[in-house]
Amino acid sequence: MYYTGFADEAGADLDIQIKATKELGWKFIETRALMGSNLAFIDDAAFDEVCRKIDAAGIKFNSFGSGVGNWATSITESPEKSYDEIRRAVPRMQKLGIEYIRIMSFPVKDMDRYESFAEEAFTRLKTISKIAEDGGVICVLENCSGWASGSYEHTLRTLEAVNSPALKLVFDTGNPVFDDDVRKYPYKKQDSWEFYNAVKDHIVYIHIKDGYMDGDKEAFTFPGEGNGCVKKIVKDLLKNGYDGGFSIEPHMAVVFHDQSVKSEADIRYNNYIEYGKRFMKIVDEIKNNICSTI
């Protein structure tokens, strides 16, 4: 297994992201915000600079946290922007040796018509997965902001309908804490442990996030201190031989998609480092416990 993270939460500048990654003793970054844009849309000169910097630092991008199908792209809008993003991303992923591209499944805002968008979601994800498969990369579908994230049943239905070797799952431990289960009104929040158990056979990658609902507001915490069942899920993964990546996404000092949440640069950086250290400690304790019971 290996550690990685959305290092743009440590700082917007790539040099800061590299510095934080190396301070944690890690070799990987899940790239998201980059040079004022992202991996798919920066110009060629900026891309060349990115390649030089990470090569010189001995750092690699293990995954591209793209905007494909994400919270900003409603299922009632054209999918062309998402198609364009993955088409642009694939050759750059190939050059950098990036295996995964994180995608979502297009959010549905009209809850009364949620089920009616099933085929549209499937069709879009088939197209996206085919682009990825042709380019030799794997889409990891996140349980976040999309039709498939409405419940674990929606996720499983999506995987069955798309039926592509280029579509796997990245499971975010924290998202169920904040997301509604759309199967029955009045909607209740999802359960991270229940969701994880239902889909774990399809998981190839993990996002570590944690928190709780403070009334009607989202509150993010260090790993293991919220309702995301982080320790329980990580223990189950490691006991069953999981050897993939753990990618931290603190959301504590800065929330990527909420520009109203800001913090001083040193707070962002230090929070990211502290988050990474705490998560590594959790993993070490779980590993030691597993070894002691064998």
Image (cartoon, rainbow, N blue to C red):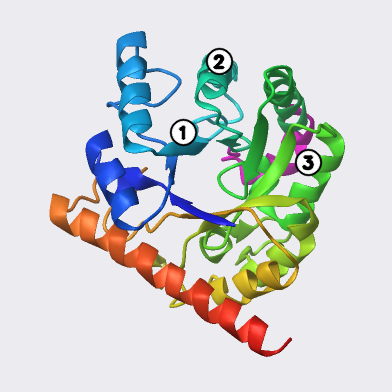
Q: Nearer the viewer, residue 8 or 14?
A: 14
Image height of 217 relative to 107, above or below: below
The residue at which mark 1 appears reads as 72
User: Which quadrant of the figure has residue 46?
Assistant: top left
**Separation of residues labelled 2 and 1 (CA atoms):** 24 Å
Residue with the most extreme top position: 44
Quarter of the image with the C terminus is bottom right
The numbered mark, 2 or 1, whose residue comes first in the sequence reads 1
The residue at which mark 3 appears reads as 158
Residue 151 image position (x, y, % from top left): 70, 56
Residue 207 image position (x, y, % from top left): 53, 55
Quarter of the image with the N terminus is bottom right
Q: Residue at the location (75% across, 59% down)? A: 200
Q: Residue at the location (57% across, 82% down)? A: 288
Residue 214 image position (x, y, % from top left): 39, 73
Image height of 235 relative to 70, above or below: below
Which kind of residue does numbered mark 3 sit on?
Thr
Query: With 97 as the anchor, is 55 left or right in this view?
Result: left
User: Which region shows up in magenta?
Assistant: 107-120
Residue 114 seen: yes
**Separation of residues labelled 1 and 3 (CA atoms):** 20 Å
Q: Main secondary structure of the magenta part?
A: helix
Residue mark closest to the camera, 1 vs 3: 3
